[in-house]
Amino acid sequence: MNVFPDFGSMSGIGDLKVVIGAMLTIILIFAVLMIIISAIIWAIATSTGNPGAAAKARAGVFVALGAAVLAGGGVTWTNWLIHLGGQL
């Protein structure tokens, strides 16, 4: 008895790539917008001498930067997992 893989079992992988790509693109756009907004607030708070607001805005820049890095890395990781799943 011969056993063969079911090559048609991954028929929806194209739709999955589109959905994940769209979600990560939206996350990346919002992360970049938050970097811009937080950087502007950080600059204004620093120039007006408000250290509390400057610290919160600085934290916002770093959190948004981390989200942008994770979203960008998520695309690579997802593509790697899909490629790996296609080989199994």
Image (cartoon, helix red, strand yellow):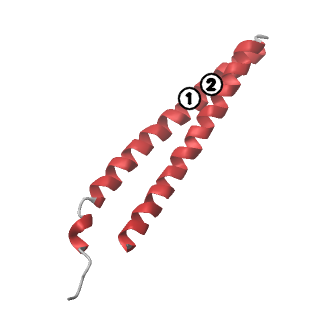
The image shows residue 4 at horizontal and vertical percentages of: 24, 82
Q: Nearer the viewer, residue 63 or 87?
A: 87
Task: Give the image location of residue 11, x and y in percent.
Answer: 23, 64
> Which residue is outermost to the front?
1
Residue pictured at 44% horizontal, 56% vertical: 78
The quarter of the image holding the C terminus is bottom left
Determine whether the residue tagged by mark 1 lies in a helix, strand or loop: helix
The residue that label 2 is drawn on is 38
Q: Residues within 10 Å of mark 2 (few under 14, many from 20)?
A: many
Kind of element beneath mark 2: helix
Specify whether 62 is left or right of 25.
right
Quadrant in the rendering for residue 52: top right
Along the line of sight, the residue nearer the viewer: 60 or 87:
87
Determine the residue located farthest toward the bottom in the rendered image.
Answer: 1
The disc label shown at residue 34, or none: 1
- In x, y percent, where is residue 16? 31, 53
Measuring 43% from the left and 68% from the top, which residue is drawn there?
84
Residue 51, relative to residue 29: is it above or below?
A: above
Tag of residue 11: none
**Residue type, mark 1 in image:** Met
Q: Is 24 left, or right, of 18 in this rendering? A: right
Instruction: State the image coordinates of residue 51 (x, y, percent, origin top left).
Output: 77, 14
Say which quadrant the N terminus sits in: bottom left
